[in-house]
Image: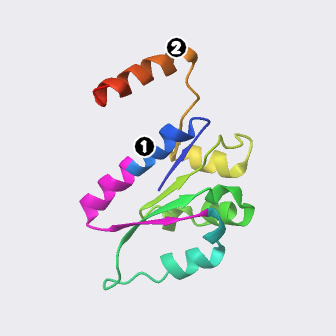
Amino acid sequence: MKVFCGDDSFESYNKLFEEASQISKKTNSEIKIINEDEITLDFFIDNLSSIDMFSTKYVYILKRALNKKEVSQYILDNIENLLKEDILIWSDSSLDKRSSVYKGLKSRDLIIEFTKLSDRELREWTIKELKLLNI
């Protein structure tokens, strides 16, 4: 399990999807994207507690899951079991560093933060991307 977040939502989502693709290839599993409005406590119970050897294996991408307090708390309370699953959580903004969820995830090195690029960094990134596209 990893959390991709920060003010540079473009880069964080790209890195998350890159990681999901690598895990998917390595484990021969499908990528399943779950949007914020679909994420409930029932989702975790129905999808993650009933895994057997004959079911399809997934790499779960949970979009904005930490926006819901009950889901955030469930993740923190059940982190040891969830660490065994291929779960990638994406947030399109920075997390509240004062929250117990942030502290719990950060203490386990599960958060990858992407800060907004400075004007200079943005210019360098743009040039690099344009070269990759042969433009």
What is the x, y in percent for residue 33?
48, 64
Instruction: Decide: few, some or many residues near mark 2? Use Cα within 10 Å; few <14, some 14-19, many ≥20.
Output: few
Magenta span: 18-35
* Badge number at residue 15: 1
Residue tagged 2: 120
Q: Residue furthest top?
A: 120
Question: For this view, does 63 lie left or right of residue 95?
Answer: left
- 91 in relation to 11, above or below: below
Determine the secondary structure under disc 1: helix
Residue 80 or 87: which is nearer the viewer? 87
The image quadrant that residue 26 belongs to is: bottom left
Residue 51 or 118: which is nearer the viewer? 118
Q: Do the residues labelled 2 and 1 touch (CB within 8 Å)?
A: no
What is the x, y in percent for residue 39?
62, 69
Earlier-in-chain disc, 2 versus 1: 1
Which residue appears at 41% of the width and 62% of the height? 86
Determine the secondary structure under disc 2: helix
